[in-house]
Image: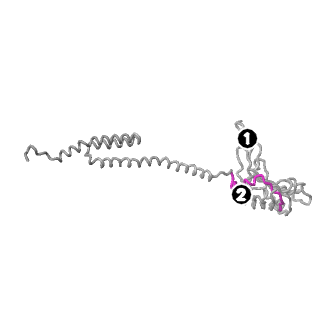
Amino acid sequence: MPASTRRTPRRTSGNTARHTAAPPRTSEARARRLRHLGRGGPVLAAVLVLAACSGTDRDPDAGPTVTAATSAEPSASAAPSATAEASPTAAPATTPATPTESSEDDTDAPSEPPGQGTSGAQSLWGTRYQGTAEVSVDAYDSCGAGGSRHFAGTRTYSVPATLDLSRPREGGGQSEDNPFSLVLTVGAPTQAGALSLWSAGVGTGSGQDLAGNPRDPRVLLVYWDLDWEGGRLTGRLTDTHAAEGTTLNLLNWPGPLVPCRPDLGTLPGGFPHAVDTGTTIEGDLDARGASLTVKGSTVQDSEEFGLRFTASPK
């Protein structure tokens, strides 16, 4: 064949034709995608536009591979977005735990008034027990040889008795440090052999201090140290308050008209003798009743006494 009729390889012109025809199809495809993006949202449109732009710099045959790789990136970035959306949901789930724990702490916090074992003792405030006291008194005088202590005799008797329990007393900005305030009255106050026991009392003092400043004139006087727990009462007389001139724990006991001559008669009604420190009280005490034992002596051991008090609430 003559050289003028020889053609260059058709392969080259075929490739050129393919490359020349591709742009129109690509432009139409891009237009369709952009129209679709208008309905799908700006974020997806931006992703596809980037993918299309990257395709112009690459071989068209490699386009799908680049586009697939590009579309995979938003999937990876979507994971943190999902985590961020789930994060606010998790936060409220842990928030209620805080007040729950604080409320449990508040519940466990102890909330008792002053005194020992007062939580159950409050139910006894305002209770009065009426019953009987069996009393035994050993009397002593100074009529022994050389004025020594001498046993004068024993007297045993039974008298009505009353026990009153109330809120711990207060005065002068202080509060009785006992589970309750206790008053035990054995017999009539003017009766020989009568006994009165007060856990605390309130006296009256000056309404001003030494500098002339006003103050509460009430003075709290605590005589007994009491402990009550599980229906069991124990106590000890710790102060007579004789120095303040307010002795409320007393045994009314008759004395002879003439010392060491009981045969000449006794003083009518008796004479109040201060109950000494160290006197004790113990026994069962609850809402069902009282069964108490008191043992002690008067000041200077003039009398030693013991009593058994049994009563029911009224």
Marks 2 and 1 sit apart, C-alpha to C-alpha, by 30 Å
Point out the tag, 2 or 1, that comes first from the N-terminus.
1
Which is in the foreground here, disc 2 or disc 1? 2
- Which residue is found at the position 89% from the left and 60% from the top? 262
Quadrant that contains the C terminus: bottom right
State the residue position of label 1: 216
Q: How is the image coloured?
A: one colour
- Where is 86 relative to 290, above or below? above
User: Please, is residue 210 above or below residue 274 in the view?
Assistant: above
On the image, which quarter does residue 299 sit in?
bottom right
> In the figure, residue 252 lies in which quadrant?
bottom right
Q: Secondary structure at mark 2?
A: strand
Q: In the picture provided, is 275 more to the left or to the right than 258? A: left
Q: Is residue 148 visible?
A: no
Q: Residues within 10 Å of mark 2 (few under 14, many from 20)?
A: many
The residue lying furthest to the left in this view is 2
Q: Position of residue 166 (x, y in %)?
A: 76, 51
Q: Please tell me which residue is depicted at 55% across the width and 49% down the height of the picture.
A: 96
Rendered location of residue 55, percent (x, y): 29, 44
Left or right, residue 58 beside residue 74 = left
**Is 126 one of the magenta-colored residues?**
yes
| Of residues 65 and 314, the one drawn nearer to the viewer in this rendering | 65
**In this view of the protein, which residue sits in the foreground, 89 or 198?**
89
Label 1 Cα crowd, 10 Å radius (few <14 / some 14-19 / many 20+) = some
Q: Give the residues in magenta.
A: 114-135
Q: Nearer the viewer, residue 302 or 248?
A: 248
What's the residue type where badge 2 is placed? Trp
Residue 131 within the segment the image draws in magenta: yes
**Identity, as a three-letter code, of the amino acid under mark 1:** Asp
Instruction: Check residue 228 in the rendering and tell me which mark sits there, or answer none.
Output: 2
